[in-house]
Amino acid sequence: MVIGDISGTTLDITTGTFEALTATTIEAATANITTAEITTGNVASADIDGGTIDGATIATSNITVGAGKTLDVSAGTFTLADNQISGDKVEGGTIEGITITGLTLDTTLIAATGAEINTVCDGYSWAAPNTIGSATPNTGSFTTIEASGDIYTTAWTDYSGTSTIVGFSSTSTSSIRYKKIGKTVLVSFFIEGGSNATNLTFTLPYTSANTVSQFITPIVIKDNSNLQTTFGSAYLVPNSNTISCYTNSINAGWTASNTKACRGELWYEAK
């Protein structure tokens, strides 16, 4: 069907099929196509206020959804190519499952439920992490700590050559070892030699806390070259790093001759 010049007139087409429709201008004010199928043609500019579009491909134009309007694809499938959404466009919400094959962090804070990690991993993993708090020591709270190796602030250290030992003319055995875990100091000692005084003391590397009570422990002793069948005692008073050893629990002194020895283990709270 060919329609000539209908300028200035009203064209109302209520139904029909157009195999080819060519026109210079179809103005919305004068042309009302209520029901029609245009199978071949080009509508250069149109205002479509309703209806259904089936099987259309938009290849050379953009679609803009106006402010306050919604593009609803919830009932269908919205298909994207790989890598088509930038991470800059994703924020908030919950991702139930995700696999990350490559991760680059450009911030120094990762927020997680119940935890804050204040240092980027920098090539380390949870299986082989870097030292926690090595640059800036801080406080952490843990429900349970399990370790396959030793736990310490200072590992077991031989202090024999540094300690000031009093009460011997010479020592045949001098072993003073300590380990520190936080503010707790563990000490193991065995000192034996020729006695030249009625007292026996030795020093430790850490001063005790200024508490109201002394640190007291029973020790095995030898006095006047005889191994005693009752325990002696080792005392550490508050705010001190000197251990005093006695031949009983009431601060009895030593024989100032022959051989004497003290052996024991103790712990105390350091400052």
Image (tube, grey):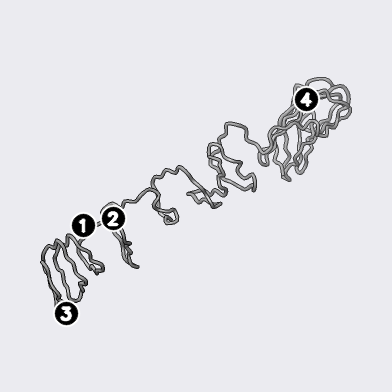
Q: Is residue 264 placed above or below 21 in the rendered structure?
A: above
Q: Which mark is residue 129?
A: none
Sort mark 2 into few (<14), some (14-19) or many (20+) by Cα contacts within 10 Å. few
Q: Going from the N terminus, do you reach mark 2 or mark 4 first?
A: 2
Distance from the alpha carbon under mark 4 to that under mark 3: 126 Å
Contact, CB < 8 Å: mark 4 with mark 1? no
Distance from the alpha carbon under mark 3 to that under mark 1: 33 Å
- The quadrant of the rendering that contains the N terminus is bottom left
Q: Amino acid at mark 4?
A: Ile
Residue ID at (16%, 72%): 32
Q: How far from the left and from the top, in percent, is residue 151?
A: 62, 35
Q: Secondary structure at mark 2?
A: loop
Q: How far from the left and from the top, in percent, is residue 21?
A: 17, 65
Q: Is residue 11 placed above or below 105 in the rendered structure?
A: below
Q: Which residue position is annotated with label 4?
A: 221
Residue ID at (55%, 44%): 121
Count of all numbered marks drawn on residues in the image: 4
> Which of labels 2 and 3 is toward the front?
3
